[in-house]
Image (cartoon, rainbow, N blue to C red):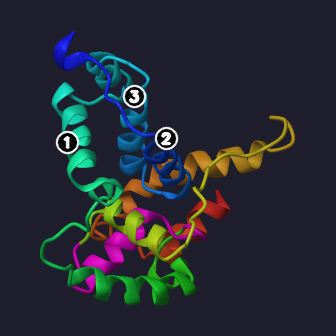
Amino acid sequence: MGRYAGISLSRTQQKQLREFMKSTKNKIEFRAAQGILLRTEGKSVKKLAHHFGVTVKQVFVWTRKFRSGGIDALRVKKQTGRPSTKAKFAKQRIEKLIDKDPQLFGYLKGRWVLRDIAHELKKEGISFHYSSVHRILHELDIKLKSPKLRALGSIKKNYRKRAEIRRYKRIAPALFKKNSSGISRRKVDRIITKS
């Protein structure tokens, strides 16, 4: 068995690891502590690596870190690197933008959508992908409802709503182009509601 045999820890070390698992909110730290505890029970490194979805080497790294530095060595250190500068400005701008109605900016929808927020930020010189906008909204604890274009109820009752949605879906892509048709967005809204 050699390298694949379990490791031996004292009862106090095992207790410390269990308490650490209860207190940590980081899944990487939790997984490392759980891996070490399972090794003390005699589980093989290959099985643990397969169970946690990591390499065999990673399981040995967890063990080595714990032996050399204890529980503090298992803690994940803050990522180093250049701090984001665009995100600061974007956060401030998004907070102000969310409070306003998207129809004031020319969007037909009554709610903000990630792509529309990213588009408005780009107009102001802050280019962000919509997935980055989602991350910033998550950091700000702002949740957007996803709009659904559908009419609830039976077909007979909502045939007008369904027809309006079909017309909107047909015309909507043209609205995002640079107004090549010469028709203003307000006129398009009137066309949709009249027909």
Quadrant for residue 157, please give it: top right
- Lower position in the chain sequence, tag 1 or tag 2: 2
Please identify, in this view, whether the residue under mark 1 or under mark 2 is nearer the observer.
2
Task: Please give the name of the residue rendered at 26% of the width and 64% of the height, measured from the top-left corner.
Answer: 77
Label 2 crowd (10 A; few <14 / some 14-19 / many >=20): few
- Determine the secondary structure under disc 3: helix
The amino acid beneath tag 1 is Arg
Give percent across and percent down for residue 22. Answer: 56, 52
Label 3 crowd (10 A; few <14 / some 14-19 / many >=20): some
Give percent across and percent down for residue 39. Answer: 36, 27
Query: In the depicted view, which residue is nearer to us: 48 or 8?
Result: 8
Which quadrant of the rendered structure holds the N terminus? top left
The amino acid beneath tag 3 is Thr
Quadrant for residue 189, please give it: bottom right
- Determine the secondary structure under disc 2: helix
Residue 153 as seen in the image, left or right of residue 135: right
Residue 151 as seen in the image, left or right of residue 56: right
For disc 1, the marked residue is 64
- Separation of disc 1 and disc 3 at Cα? 14 Å
Give percent across and percent down for residue 80. Answer: 16, 70
Residue 18 as seen in the image, left or right of residue 77: right
For disc 3, the marked residue is 40
Bounds of the magenta segment: 109-127
Does the magenta-highlighted stretch encompass residue 140? no
Q: Are marks 1 and 3 in contact (CB under 8 Å)?
A: no
- Lower position in the chain sequence, tag 2 or tag 3: 2
Does the magenta-highlighted stretch encompass residue 120? yes
Give percent across and percent down for residue 70. Answer: 31, 54
Task: Please give the name of the residue rendered at 26% of the width and 86% of the height, measured from the top-left corner.
Answer: 124
- Separation of disc 2 and disc 3 at Cα? 11 Å
Which quadrant of the rendered structure holds the C terminus? bottom right
